[in-house]
Image (cartoon, rainbow, N blue to C red):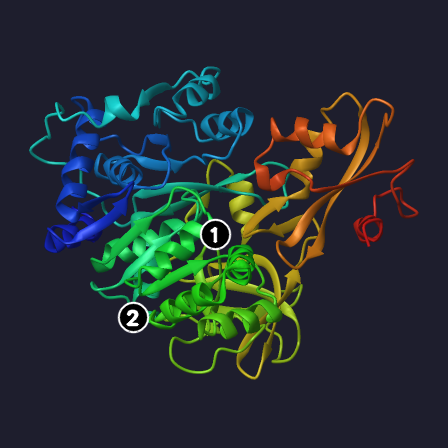
Amino acid sequence: MAAEAQLFLRAAVHGTRTAIRSGGNEYSYDDLLRASARVAARLLDAVDDLAEARVAFLVPPGFAYSAVQWGIWRAGGIAVPLATSHPIPELAYTIADADTTVAVADDAHVSDVRAAAAAHGCAVWSLSELMTDAAAVPASLPPLHAERRAMILYTSGTTSRPKGVVTTHGGLEAQIRTLVDAWAWHADDHILCVLPLHHVHGIVNVLGCAQWSGARCTVHPTFDADATWDAIAAGDLTLFMAVPTIYTKLITAWRAAPPARRAELSAACARMRLMVSGSAALPVSTLAEWRDISGHTLLERYGMTEIGMALSNPLHGERRPGHVGTPLPGVDVRLVDEQGERVQDGTPGEIEVRGPGVFREYWRRPDATRDAFRAGGWFRTGDVAVIDSGYYRILGRSSVDIIKTGGYKVSALEIEEVLRTHPGIRECAVVGVPDDEWGERVAAAIVGDTAALDAAMLRTWAKSQLAPYKVPTRVTFVRELPRNAMGKVTKEDVKQLFA
């Protein structure tokens, strides 16, 4: 990779083309380069290189988000995106765990970020301070070689608290190049982003691929079914990517529309060239109904924060319902048994992945990083699949403590740890229970003081401690949790409490 990252060199070529449409305004690639250079200058503040200092930022999706993200990179920092939906305790955990040097927030969130950063002692900039036109852009910005760390995304695993997944500039470029090639991105594409931008799906698959290609990205700060249908109906989108929950909500909104509106929306979908679903299992019934509405067979793919995307149904060719396709170009994928030996086709095995897009490390967790890889650089995903006539079909997680809900991967252990801090809870067990809309719902079995606590009260309290998608939507109170002969809580029996 050249001293200036390829992403920015390509942006200079795209120049006056529209990069982002947000808030009713259009911004060119030149606008993005100028704004990000000012952000870089403010962050550098007379030093030559941030030298991989962590810069957390809480900015809603839109032009300012990309300007800050690019500015952090161009200054030589590591970008740590924060989630606008997270309460202060979750923000504080990320800021502290990443050992953040500087945090940035828009005006609506700056007070929360200051509260979250207070204990850690990092500086906090408001977006208006950071993006001032007064910043003098240095004559040169630090070199961004492929091996330099670029981003830390926090993801839940089998441990109780989220881990920081570190991706390099070279890793990000590899992830983007793979998808641009596989899905034939080009400069005349126009995609709508309704996904959160603290997650690889939105950051890489949507925004990163669009910006690499010189395409246009219309950004909505949050998902709204009616607003999304309005954007599709405008007729100039070429791609759309979302999680199954979003497609379910769009189907519901389409059903509620008058016949003439439904015909208009279906016709607008048919003019698009590609629609993709990922981050959670897509029910075959949802795929079939969306195909009836839109004329599109959703392209399902498989990936995760640590690897980007690894498997995909083809752009051209059979998209098999219930399957996530075949390995993407440049990505090695295999299925292995518990001893790490390859399994035969038709036999379930754990998915292992290697390639240039695989993450570098878990931030400051050398033991977890070591345990995540097998000899030869194979990353152990923890997902179990089977190869069916050449196509991979996901069977589930190898850990019962991972819940996939609405496209998010959350740790049951983390939620349990937080719930146990409530004075009215003596014991608890959290599981994922199947749900047509969310894939899985977070469910909690509680042993506690039912006279002083009910499900509504518990949810209200949990919302102040956990991200919204981690808050249990189903709660049951029990005298005791089911256990085996050794006294261990049996999660499969807990799930039966919600059957």
Q: Amino acid at mark 2?
A: Ala
Quadrant where the C terminus sits is bottom right
Circle 1 packing at 10 Å, graded few (<14), some (14-19), many (20+), is: some
Q: Position of residue 164 (x, y in %)?
A: 48, 39
- Is 80 on the left or on the right of 177, as rendered? right
Q: Position of residue 463 (x, y in %)?
A: 62, 30
- Is 173 on the left or on the right of 99, as rendered? left
Q: Amino acid at mark 1?
A: Ala
Residue receiving disc 2: 184
Q: Secondary structure at mark 2?
A: loop
Residue receiving disc 1: 225
To which quarter of the image does residue 309 belong?
bottom left
Q: Nearer the viewer, residue 67 or 265?
A: 265
| Viewer can see residue 358 | no
Residue 470 versus residue 286 in the image, above or below: above
Residue 335 versus residue 73 in the image, above or below: below
Circle 2 packing at 10 Å, graded few (<14), some (14-19), many (20+), is: few
